[in-house]
Image (cartoon, grey):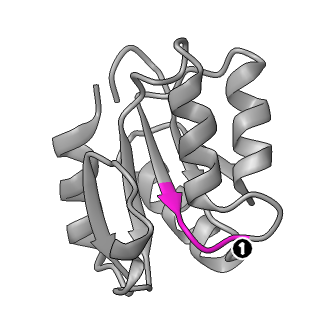
Amino acid sequence: MIDGRPILVVDDDNDLRETIGELLAEEGYDARLCENGRVALDCLRKGERPALILLDLMMPEMNGWQFREEQLRDARLAGIPVVVMTASRGFEDQSITASEFLFKPIGLGELLQAVERNVR
């Protein structure tokens, strides 16, 4: 963890979101959990400044692509690194920029290594 800033976990799968949160907490990170892009965006706009965002793509209400578009439009949020977590291998036709891509199912070691590489 850098300067006590949290890692934002954005995923509509409650079990996965909770598991990732617990794993990050065990490793000393401050995990903040959001069930979709809209909730995450609201959290960020209220002043949350995570060191990293772990972002699922397929979510109701506001998906990962929509979240990322809104994040990049906001100069205060655009610099926060994003690691995309997805089960979809065929999303290339809907391009999205991210620091890194992880494909589900994600191994816990693989996830922690990605976090360590991308936390700023």
The residue at 56%/52% (across/down) is: 9
- Residue at (70, 51) in percent of width and height: 37
Q: Which residue is mark 1?
A: 14
**111 sits left or right of 47 in the view:** left
Point out residue 89 in the picture as x, y percentages from the top left corner: 34, 86
Residue 83 position (above or below residue 15): above
Relative image position of residue 111 (x, y in whole percent):
29, 64
Type of amino acid at the residue the image marks with label 1:
Asn
Q: Is residue 77 above or below residue 10?
A: above
Secondary structure of the magenta portion, mostly? loop
Which quadrant of the structure image shows residue 93? Answer: bottom left
Image location of residue 5, percent across then percent down: 47, 22
Residue 75 can be seen in this image:
yes
Residue visible at 55% across and 12% down in the picture: 76
Is 69 positioned to the left or the right of 63 in the image?
left
**Mark 1 residue element:** helix
Q: Residues in magenta? A: 55-59
Compare residues 9 and 84 and report the one nearer the observer. 84
**Mark 1 surroundings: few (<14), some (14-19) or many (≥20) residues within 10 A:** few
**Residue 58, image x and y in percent?**
61, 74
Say above or below: 69 vs 62.
Answer: above
